[in-house]
Image (cartoon, rainbow, N blue to C red):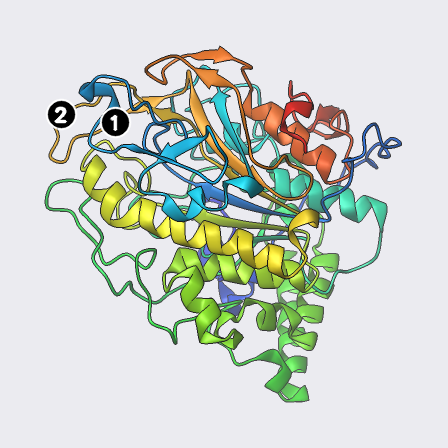
Amino acid sequence: MFVLNGNQKQLCTGVTRRGLLHLGGLGAFGLTLADFLGLRPAAAAPSPRASRFGQARSCILIYKYGSPPQHETFDPKPDAPSEIQGEMKAIPTVVPGIRIGDHLPRIAGIMDRLTIVRSLTHPYALHGTVYATSGIPDVDTRIEAQPRHPRQWPFIGSIVDYLEEQRSPGMLPTIPRNVALPFVMGSKNEYPPLAGPYGATLGPRYDPVYTDFPAPGTRTAPEIRPDRAFADPLLGIRPTDRLQLGGPAADPRDLPAERLELRRSLLAQMERGRRALDFHAGVRAFRSQEEQAFALLANGKMQEALDFTREPMPVREAYGMTLFGQSCLAARRLIEAGGKFVTVIWDAYGLNAGSWDTHHNHYGRLKEFLLPVFDQTFSALILDLETRGLLDETLVLVISEHGRTPEIDSKPKGAGRHHWSSAYSQVYAGGGMGRGHVVGATDAHAGQVTETPISPKDVLATAFYLLGIDPDTTVPDAQGRPMPITGTGELRKELLG
């Protein structure tokens, strides 16, 4: 799948610009047009300011679109009235004094490896994916569905990719530095993809390398809205289903030399053809991306790493035979193969209003789908990384846009909690994050922060720090001016081990 979010303007041949860019299924290799003008070398990382600087060699970012509730996950309020606490309770963890939601028993068993933050806060109770994953200063709903708008800020993984390239110019990694699974965010529901995980002002060249997953789900998920239920692969897939890289082609290592040469020829044709397209002034050729694409085709390491069917069945079953579970397993394989930044997106499927956005059927979706799947997969990922000696050097972040309202709305079937950003929770592990402790606190209703308020920008700044990147580094904006990579974010040593 060759993805470029642009307009549908037709060429004189009758083929749309977007249609042309889907040719050959090469988008997953990053073959996007980019504006390379004005990019300046990033500031060099400073000498370590603390022992954890640069401890993380890689990062797995789990993005839960729609936003989970703090009450049923990491900030339960067992003493609150029923309209706040709801149907679900709290359970103890292996760390004395720390309690979490009762539908996360496996995570409770690994709490000694985790850091919970209960005091995330910001003023935008909206699905601001860009706000959650970049340094952009506010949520602008007018551009939220425009990944290429010049006011967008680069995704954290895109910045890591860009800065790594600045450190080692001309060197092509065998595994792309910025990969996103299992499919382009927003591509499997009724609305166009939202902004967020894109290179933005750095150019499409720094978009994540996306995979695709065309297979249907095997289990029907609890309904999202009345009479709107879907067979969701995030709840169940077949053991033989796989992620795709560049369409359903054979393993590149099995392709004969003439087939590889044919694909190189196709790249050359696309390079010649794009000169006839009326792109805006200053857009340059994507030669380095062509080389990376061909390198991936030739060595097959990327496709091999993505192929979770190579894992022993007990390992696969430990992660869960779901698209989320097998995507997290693929993320571990990519990191083990040398990947730098891998994002697993738990996205809405079927309806845009879905995933963790539980305005309707809150309890049904949490109990029968969202929490059991997350509990199994996340705990398996952390233990697998630890067993393989990768946890200390792999930062794992679980983030979302906001939290959910303290008071339950009993009117929808299955009840609902709505958007809330004054206080919410997240969980992190590995790569220098603390182990077995909670940061911050909220009031008796988990509605307001009472201790250690933390901005999502602070989380990004701390993540960059652990990855060996000075949080004060800048990258060029659309006009070539210095743009701070975390906006107003600051390193929060409370999160560190």
| In this picture, residue 20 sits left or right of residue 162 | left
Within the image, what quadrant is residue 447 found in? top left
Residue 83 visible in the displayed image: yes
Q: Quadrant of the C terminus?
A: top right
Query: Where is residue 25 drawn, in percent x and y?
Result: 51, 67
Answer few, some or many: residues within 10 Å of disc 2's Cα (few below 14, many 20 plus, some between 14 and 19). Answer: some
- Between the residue at mark 1 and the residue at mark 2, the CA separation in whole angstroms equals 9 Å
Q: Residue furthest front?
A: 96
Residue at horizontal 49%, vertical 22%? 120
User: Is the Cβ of the residue at disc 1 closer than 8 Å to that at disc 2?
Assistant: no
Q: Amino acid at mark 1?
A: Arg
Answer few, some or many: residues within 10 Å of disc 1's Cα (few below 14, many 20 plus, some between 14 and 19). Answer: many
The local secondary structure at tag 2 comes to loop
The local secondary structure at tag 1 comes to loop
| In this picture, residue 117 sits left or right of residue 162 | left
| In this picture, residue 336 sits left or right of residue 422 | right
Residue picked out by circle 1 = 417
Query: Where is residue 163 drawn, in percent x and y?
Result: 76, 42
Q: Which mark is residue 66?
A: none
Residue at horizontal 29%, vertical 24%? 78
Query: Where is residue 344 drawn, in percent x and y?
Result: 50, 50
Q: Amino acid at mark 2?
A: Ser
| In this picture, residue 146 sits left or right of residue 418 | right
Residue 14 visible in the displayed image: no
Residue picked out by circle 2 = 410
Query: Where is residue 32 drawn, in percent x and y?
Result: 60, 53
Query: In the depicted view, which residue is nearer to us: 97 or 226?
Result: 97
**Picture layout, residue 465 above or below residue 375:** above
**Earlier along the polypeptide chain: callout 1 or callout 2?**
2
